[in-house]
Image: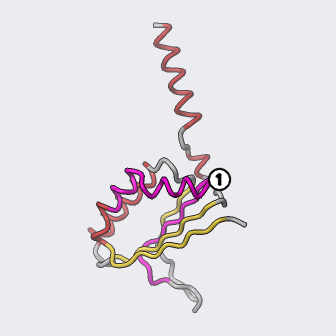
């Protein structure tokens, strides 16, 4: 019983110290930022939007490399310089370009593309490194 307790305690501390937690997700990392804009084929279709949101949120939850993430929709803009033509945006920060490269080939990313690519007509990506 004592060994079981110490094993559970060790595993809990290991997962807690190495896993991504909500506090880590609040610390935006400016080393590498990946910004993606999606235009859905049927942006007014409730079922398509729900399928996309479910898939992208699962992807962000399961990504091993994304340090922080934000999934959003365009607000009602009142300025000419604001482009609100997209359906969804994704902003992800990484500790390095190498981490972002691993993110591109991880299972969670591949599953997201497989589940959702039929829902969009256009995707634009902007990657930036901090100065």
- Residue 39: quarter of image: bottom left
Q: Which residues make up the magenta segment?
A: 84-113
Q: Is residue 101 magenta?
A: yes
- Residue 121: quarter of image: bottom left
Q: Is residue 71 magenta?
A: no
- Give left or right: position of 121 versus 23: left
- Give left or right: position of 32 versus 105: right
- Give left or right: position of 64 versus 113: right
Position above or below: 23 against 109: above
Q: Position of residue 14 (x, y in %)?
A: 55, 29
Which sits in the foreground, 67 or 100? Answer: 100
Which sits in the foreground, 130 or 39? Answer: 130
- What residue appears at the point 52 percent right and 27 percent down from the top-left corner? 12
Secondary structure of residue under mark 1: loop
Tell me the colour scheme of the image: secondary structure
- What residue appears at the point 53 percent right and 39 percent down from the top-left corner? 19
Task: Identify the residue at the far right of this view.
Answer: 131
Position above or below: 32 against 27: below
Q: Position of residue 131 (x, y in %)?
A: 73, 67
Q: Residues within 10 Å of mark 1 (few under 14, many from 20)?
A: few
- What residue appears at the point 61 percent right and 55 percent down from the top-left corner? 96
The residue identified by callout 1 is 27
Q: How many marks?
A: 1
- What residue appears at the point 45 percent right and 7 percent down from the top-left corner? 1
- Give left or right: position of 27 versus 126: right
Task: Identify the residue at the far bottom of this view.
Answer: 80
Q: Position of residue 15 (x, y in %)?
A: 52, 32
Q: Position of residue 65 (x, y in %)?
A: 52, 50
């Amino acid at each position: 019983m004592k060994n079981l307790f110490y094993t559970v305690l060790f595993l809990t501390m290991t997962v807690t110290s190495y896993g991504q937690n909500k506090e880590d997700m609040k610390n935006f990392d400016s080393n590498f930022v990946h910004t993606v804009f999606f235009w859905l084929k049927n942006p007014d279709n409730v079922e398509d939007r729900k399928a996309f949101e479910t898939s992208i949120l699962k992807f962000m939850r399961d990504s091993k490399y994304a340090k922080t993430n934000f999934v959003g929709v365009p607000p009602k803009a009142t300025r000419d310089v604001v482009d609100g033509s997209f359906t969804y945006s994704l902003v992800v920060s990484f500790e390095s370009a190498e981490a972002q490269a691993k993110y591109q080939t991880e299972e969670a990313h591949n599953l997201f593309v497989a589940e959702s690519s039929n829902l969009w007509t256009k995707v634009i990506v902007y990657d930036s490194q901090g100065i």
